Image (cartoon, rainbow, N blue to C red):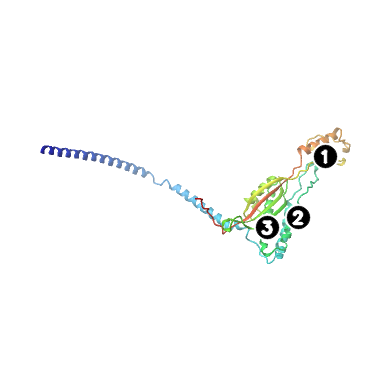
Amino acid sequence: MDNLKKNLHFVVFGVGILLGVVFLLVGIMIRGGTEEELSTAQINLAKWTVVPTKGTLDQATERSNRFGDSLKDAETKLTSGPGVAFTSGFTTYGSGSEFYTSEARPSLQKLKDRFAAMAKPVPMPSLMEGWALVRSGSDKEQIWDRLEGEMTSPAPDKIREMQMRLRILQELAATCERLLASGAGETFGVKLLEVNFDSFGVTGGGEADSPWLSMPFTVKLECSPSFAVVLADELVNPTTRTMSGQGENARRGFPILLDMLQTEMTERPPEIRLDIGNEDKAEVARKLNEKGKGIIVPPDPTELDPEIGEGKKLVEAATEDLNENDRIVLPVRAGLKLRAAAFNKNWRAVKKEENQ
């Protein structure tokens, strides 16, 4: 029994030594691998004298600064620049009659003259040069008579609203003038047919919920289709094309919001009759020959008989030219629904509660 105990002690002692040797070897191997990884990492780290993310950080900082500057610039323009140009800089008057005499009457006369200068007659075919197309429609004089009647003696609390109407008309006139000067409108001018205004106020909801204070207005013009589109774009997004003017007829560039743009064809005459009298035969033949028709005109053009020979050829050439080549082209009527706006300094962002 004693010998067995001694043997067990020996066996236990022997196993303990064996485990110790194994753990020692494992520890040495782990330590050696870790030291090697640390040495390799230290060597690789020494290669980087500059942190590789520094350039990225500089770019991010620059972008952040640009965003901050842009945000500050936008805030400045909204609160003290173009954002309030529609509601600032008005002259104060003590009575409606004083306003009419000092501002409304002279302003309306200038606007009337400016819009009259932009209206052009419908271009006619060369064979009908000197003719004019007369069409029924709104009398532009009625627009100015109505506006003048509304501004003759407004109540004191309505004077500012009348000044806003004048400012809208001045902005519209300046934009149209600059566009026509830049070549827009093709061969058509701009004829003001109708203009109406609503009251100035918030765009919807309460004042704290509306970013804009605005005056809605509608305008009906007669112009080319392309001019209607570029006019709407320039009113909403002013560029140097229309903002480069100087003096009292220059644009203010206040915010204008577009709600609708619609165009419609004007009434086309069902038939246009051209009577070529004896006194007109030579001139009509000359114009047709300039277009390559090759009509032989006798010494006395009145001898051209419309039923035979060169006279019949002249009639056929004139008919073809007016019906196929040099036809009358009419402008369109364009209706614009807009809002002249100013930034609402009392506006606050409102976050709607999500439905639970």
| Residue 238 showing in the rendered view | no
* Circle nearer the viewer, 2 or 1: 2
Q: How many marks?
A: 3
* Marked residue nearer the N-terminal end (2 or 3): 2
Q: Which residue is mark 3?
A: 165
Vertical placement of residue 299 versus 133, above or below: above
Question: Are the residues at dot 1 and dot 3 in contact (C-beta closer than 8 Å)?
Answer: no
* Marked residue nearer the N-terminal end (1 or 3): 3
Q: Amino acid at mark 3?
A: Arg
Q: Amino acid at mark 1?
A: Val
Question: Are the residues at dot 2 and dot 3 in contact (C-beta closer than 8 Å)?
Answer: no
Q: Amino acid at mark 2?
A: Gln
Q: What x and y, as percent, mark residue 291?
A: 78, 37
Dot 1, how many residues are within 10 Å of its Cα: few (below 14), some (14-19), or many (20+)? many
Q: What x and y, as percent, mark residue 142?
A: 75, 55
| Viewer-side residue, 316 vs 241 | 316
Dot 2, how many residues are within 10 Å of its Cα: few (below 14), some (14-19), or many (20+)? few
**In the drawing, does residue 226 fall left or right of residue 130?**
left
Q: What x and y, as percent, mark residue 18?
A: 20, 38
Element marked by disc 2 = helix
The numbered disc on residue 284 is 1
Q: Residue furthest front?
A: 356
Identify which residue is drawn at 84% across, 34% down: 312
* Marked residue nearer the N-terminal end (2 or 1): 2
Instruction: Choose top left, top right, bottom left or bottom right for residue 105.
Output: bottom right
Question: Are the residues at dot 2 and dot 1 in contact (C-beta closer than 8 Å)?
Answer: no
Q: Which residue is mark 2?
A: 142
